[in-house]
Image: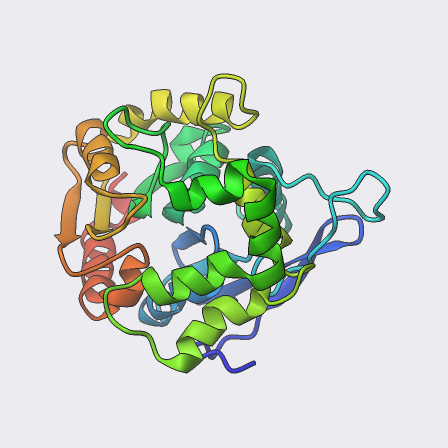
Amino acid sequence: MNFPDYPFTPQRLDVRPGIAMSYLDEGPRDGDVIVMLHGNPSWSFYWRHLVSGLSDRYRCIVPDHVGMGLSDRPDDAPSASPSYDYTLQSRIDDVDALLQHLGINGPVTLAVHDWGGMIGFGWALRDPSRIRRLVITNTAAFPLPKAKRFPMRLAMGRDSRFGGWLIRRFNLFARGAAWFGTKRTLSKDVRAAYAGVYDGWDKAISTLRFMQDIPLHAGDRAMPLVQASAQALPGYADRPVFIGWGLRDFVFDKHFLDGFRAALPNAEVHAFEDAGHYALEDKHEALVPKIRAFLDANPLARF
């Protein structure tokens, strides 16, 4: 496949026996580490402009979560070999395994989008002191705000067996996000890069499993981690935080942005009325230099 503006050479790591994660490791080995975590249904492709804009100075670590992007697509049936449990906890464990493998055990800057927020802030619970700077784009680190209704388009995958079949059979979620996740019209090649990696029943498994793992109720398996992340979030208010937000996101809308503003009142916020869910796709020309300036102005040596 052709991946526009993605001139990188992915590497691979077996994060579990027989299950390989694809990831980018771009930039100087002694540079400040930026860990970029994507969500659903994207992959490291979402971060490509930021990697290009930072990797001359910063070390950019960008995994494709298992089942996503260029990583392996294991089944989750108990009889499968290998089998993978598509849960938030598994994602957190995978990120930790990757960073341990790379010998990254010091301070990091965490950049998150969509499910990457819950994965990243969940991982950060292991040692919050390692998180020295935050770059936040259209994501969550807390349960659904009370003022926000859960979108029907997500409920179709989360709660409907027929909806789940449609998503895997026709790759509806990734295709829909490539068409409607931005305000600008993406080129055919860019849409294909976002969605084409999920074409096929086996390849789309993780796009559905992420939806089915969305925590809404007390008994949902991801809820304890998300609640713990929410409780910890105000503790990052003393660190530099950059928020870049697309206000036309039908999921992570102003209600989620308000949640981050309340928890992180000193954050540098750039919200765009003409940007959607894929904020870095809509506004990379503006956001990449702003994020670079934010990082340069807040060196780790200060902390």
| Quadrant in which the N terminus appears | bottom right
Horizontally, is 85 left or right of 186 in the view?
right
Query: In the image as oriented, which residue stretches furthest toward the front?
Result: 162
Q: Looking at the image, which residue is at 20% across and 54% down?
A: 294
Residue 67 or residue 290, whichever sits in front: 67
The answer to whether residue 187 is above or below residue 223 is: below
Query: In the image as oriented, which residue stretches furthest toward the top?
Result: 218
Q: Looking at the image, which residue is at 28% across and 38% down?
A: 303
Q: Position of residue 41 (x, y in %)?
A: 48, 55
The answer to whether residue 253 is above or below residue 66 is: above
> Looking at the rendering, which quadrant does residue 48 occupy?
bottom left
Residue 269 or residue 154, whichever sits in front: 154
Total tally of numbered discs in the picture: 0
Q: Position of residue 300 (x, y in %)?
A: 30, 46
> Looking at the rendering, which quadrant does residue 226 occupy?
top left
Q: Is any atom of residue 95 visible in this view? A: no
Horizontally, is 201 left or right of 291 in the view?
right
Q: Position of residue 38 (x, y in %)?
A: 45, 53
Q: Is any atom of residue 242 visible in this view? A: yes
Q: Position of residue 71 (x, y in %)?
A: 63, 60
Figure coloring? rainbow
Q: Looking at the image, which residue is at 78% across and 42% down?
A: 77
Q: Looking at the image, which residue is at 72% across and 43% down?
A: 84
Residue 279 or residue 239, whichever sits in front: 279
The answer to whether residue 285 is above or below residue 166 is: below
